[in-house]
Amino acid sequence: MHFHPWTGSHAQGKKISNSSSITEFLLLAFADTQELQLLHFWLFLGIYLAAMLGNGLIITAIACDLRLHTPMYFFLLNLSLIDLGSISTTLPKAMANSLWDNRDISYQGCVAQLSFFFFFVSAEYFLLTIMAYDRYVAICKPLHYGTLLSSTACVHMAAAAWGTGFLYAVLHTANTFSLLLCQGNALDQFFCEIPHILKLACSDTYLREVGLLVVSACLFFGCFVFIVLSYVQIFRAMLRIPSEQGRHRAFSTCLPHLAVVSLFVSTAIFAYLKPPSISSPSLDLVVAVLYSVVPPAVNPLIYSMRNQELKDALSKLARWMLFHRQ
């Protein structure tokens, strides 16, 4: 007999006094009928394949084209790798649950999903901060670009972004899953995420993780201020460029990064800082998709739309693939 995910006491989550006795969590379903679940499966499969294709093409084009072996494209390659990891952390499990009309995720699977998602999201934000510095040096200090952003410096900065994201993920995951969970095992989210696991914690045990999140928020706010100040200096330098063509060229190199940062930050801010009065499971689900699924899928499109060098590399790669097949 098939157990429907929305019925029975099992769907309400078990009242559990110790997190060590939890063997699985229940994720929020996208719909309450099998037909709509299948519709969501096909929709997310299309988004996932588009994200894999877009980011994969950018990684391949940058790796294969010597003209793109510059700091800006090196960081873009890292961004595409992070986007691939980020969307692969959440969507495959959501697609599987929609396809099989299921809500379960194992305890170990939840730990892994939370740690990987936090790792990739943190690394992406730190990398976007570094990319803002790259654009600042390129436009405001062009004579020092080769020195400040040498190959060694770029590798060290990228490694710092990945490493800091990893440390944050380990710290937050260990802290979150050391809490006592006594409010059941049903998460109001389609993937494992820290705020929703904290809702399951006993009343006085989650303050430690909240304190850690506040410290993290301060660091993330510091990165945001750095990005804003970088672009203030960039726009001031642009206004001093005498030719309109020069200003347009400088702006076109910054616009994709600015668009990606705006999408990333605006969706995250709305997700975590929206007023409780407008919060609902349906809205939370839509917002979660916006900040966890849309950016990795859209970023390749944003970067390739106005970047002629990347367009040329992608068309060259496409021609090579077609010729190679023939």
Image (tube, helix red, strand yellow):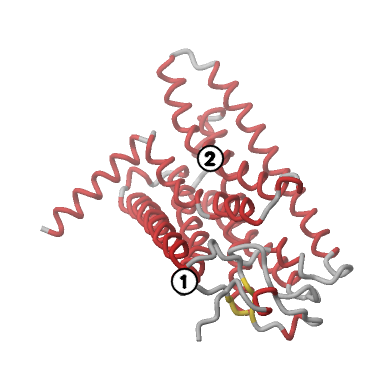
Closer mark to the observer between disc 2 and disc 1: 1
Taking the view exactly as shown, the residue that stands out farthest to the top is 242
What is the x, y in percent for residue 164?
65, 59
> Residue at point 40% right, 18% down?
245
Q: Nearer the viewer, residue 227 or 93?
A: 93
Say left or right for 129 vs 15: left
Residue picked out by circle 2: 147
Q: Secondary structure at mark 2?
A: helix
52 vs 285, nearest the viewer: 285
Q: Residue at x 54, y 36 (%)?
A: 258
Q: Amino acid at mark 1?
A: Ala
Measured from the top left, where is residue 125 in percent x and y? 61, 49
The residue sitting at the left extreme is 326
Image-quadrant location for residue 144:
top right
Query: Amino acid under label 2?
Result: Thr
Disc 2 and disc 1 in contact, CB within 8 angstroms: no
Residue plotted at (52% across, 49% down): 154
Please rate how many residues cluster around mark 2, counting C-alpha atoms within 10 Å: few if below 14, some from 14 to 19, many from 20: few
Vertical comparison of 59 with 176: above or below: above
Q: Quarter of the image for the C terminus: give it.
A: bottom left
Q: Secondary structure at mark 1?
A: helix
Give x and y (percent) for residue 307: 38, 36
- Tell me residue 6's x, y (percent): 60, 71
Choose the circle earlier in sequence order: 2 or 1: 1
Q: Residue 254's mark?
A: none
Instruction: Please state which of residues 149 and 207 is positioned toward the viewer in this rendering.
Output: 207
Count of picture labels? 2
Is 259 positioned to the left or the right of 229 in the image? left
Q: CA distance from mark 2 to mark 1?
A: 48 Å
Residue 168, by quadrant, is: bottom right
Q: Which residue was labeled with disc 1?
A: 96
Q: Is residue 177 above or below residue 315?
A: below
